[in-house]
Amino acid sequence: MKKKIIILGSTGSIGTTTLKILKAQKNFKIIALTSNKNVELLYKQSIEHKVKSVIVEDENNFSLYKDKFLKKNIKIYLGLHNIKKLIKNKVDYCINSISGIEGLDPTLKMIPLTKHLLIANKEAIICGWSIIKSSLKKHNTKFIPLDSEHFSTWTLIKNEKIKMVDHIILTASGGPFLNIPLKKQKNINLNMALNHPTWKMGKKITIDSSTLMNKIFEFIEAKKIFNLTKNQISILIHPKSFLHAIVFMNGETIRILAHDTNMIIPISNALGIKQSKINIKFKIKKLTDMANFKMIEPDKKNFPLITTLKLLPNKDSYFETILITLNDELVDMYLNKKISYVSIHYNLLKFIKKPYFRKFYRSKPKNINNIKNMIELTKKYLRANYINYE
């Protein structure tokens, strides 16, 4: 029997990579694909992979493309709230690759409808993990993280009790400005910031990688997913980007997982596809690649945003939602050339410490509406008070 799968955000990098993997697999059936605005690509994907149902979030694109899909006998729905019309029984897998906090609501909608939730949306985990975790337990849905670091860590400890884990290390590439202090980054242009040395990713995550914010988010994710304390997690820079998980186990053993910088590896393994059935060859070019385990502690002069982790409360709070919203807004401003590169750092560091926000760090959201309200409050305050540092 074929395994049924739904891909949320199929036109993004995780979605397109997943489809690349599934193209050669005969034992999977894609039930539905979803997209927000890239409906032209969604149309091509649905034709190529013989998908009979799609969901479009953007109303204008839905109206524009509706007839085109229907002419190919592809059912098209407006909005993910229609997903229940497509599913009679739980599907085997749902991959949520919708970027940003917009991925939280779809995550909660899909948990009751899938046996396995594979998620690459760090914002949803960071802001709403307690809500997600409760729903996973209620609906007996298994959770698998797709971020390479978290998938690798999960792979190493999934059969262990968490008390056996002493410490984990998250590795970062260091991005394009590894050896440049922030005070010398005033003239960083967009092309420079998007020129990641080891990964090819979307614009938003590439900027987050350059500021190390992506790794800060992964720190918070790891704390929540694996139920760890802040003292059990460290961030080290590994420029080769070959090591993805280092876990110190109680009993003085160290477990390491290494692989090429290719998301095909965690996605295919999370779907239970054997390496021999993946149309990709894993090669280690030189033995020195395995031997070069050079690690660098992040320099706070180069990556000052890492100091925000000192403010991270031990328990879930609104801090996570505020941090993500501030960063999302500032990066969006930078990508649209409204602020300079250093303005991302200076504004975020200033706002995250403001008493206006700090009073919320002692309480936590109880539901998704609490999170949405905090997002809007944070956006409104930032937009009214940000500074463009030249």
Image: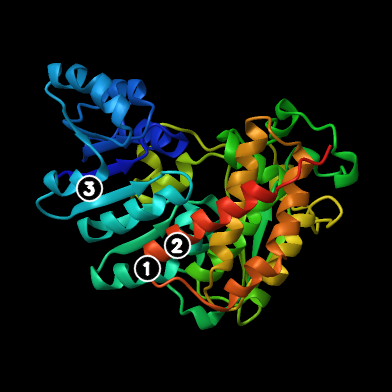
Residue 202 rendering spot, x and y as whole percentages: 55, 34
Badge 1 element: loop
Mark with earlier residue (1, 3): 3
The Cα–Cα distance between marks 1 and 3, rounded to whole angstroms, is 18 Å
| Residue of label 3 | 81
Residue sitting at 33 percent across and 33 percent down? 58
Mark with earlier residue (3, 2): 3
Q: Is residue 257 visible?
A: no
Residue 151 rendering spot, x and y as whole percentages: 49, 56
Q: Amino acid at mark 2?
A: Ile
Pointer 2 with pointer 1, Cβ within 8 A: yes
- Badge 3 density bin: few <14, some 14–19, many ≥20, Cα 10 Å: some
Residue 330 in which image quadrant: top right
Pointer 1 with pointer 3, Cβ within 8 A: no
Q: Give residue 371's mark.
A: 2
Residue sitting at 76 percent across and 36 percent down? 340
The Cα–Cα distance between marks 3 and 2, rounded to whole angstroms, is 19 Å
The Cα–Cα distance between marks 2 and 1, rounded to whole angstroms, is 7 Å
Badge 3 element: helix
Residue 367 in which image quadrant: bottom left
Image side of residue 22 versus residue 81, left or right? right
Q: Is residue 140 visible?
A: yes
| Residue of label 1 | 367
Badge 2 element: helix
Q: Is residue 44 above or below residue 387?
A: above
Q: Nearer the viewer, residue 277 or 62?
A: 62
Q: Is residue 27 above or below residue 364?
A: above
Q: How is the image coloured?
A: rainbow
Image side of residue 24 versus residue 227, left or right? left
Q: Amino acid at mark 1?
A: Asn
Q: Nearer the viewer, residue 182 or 233?
A: 182
Residue sitting at 50 percent across and 78 percent down? 162
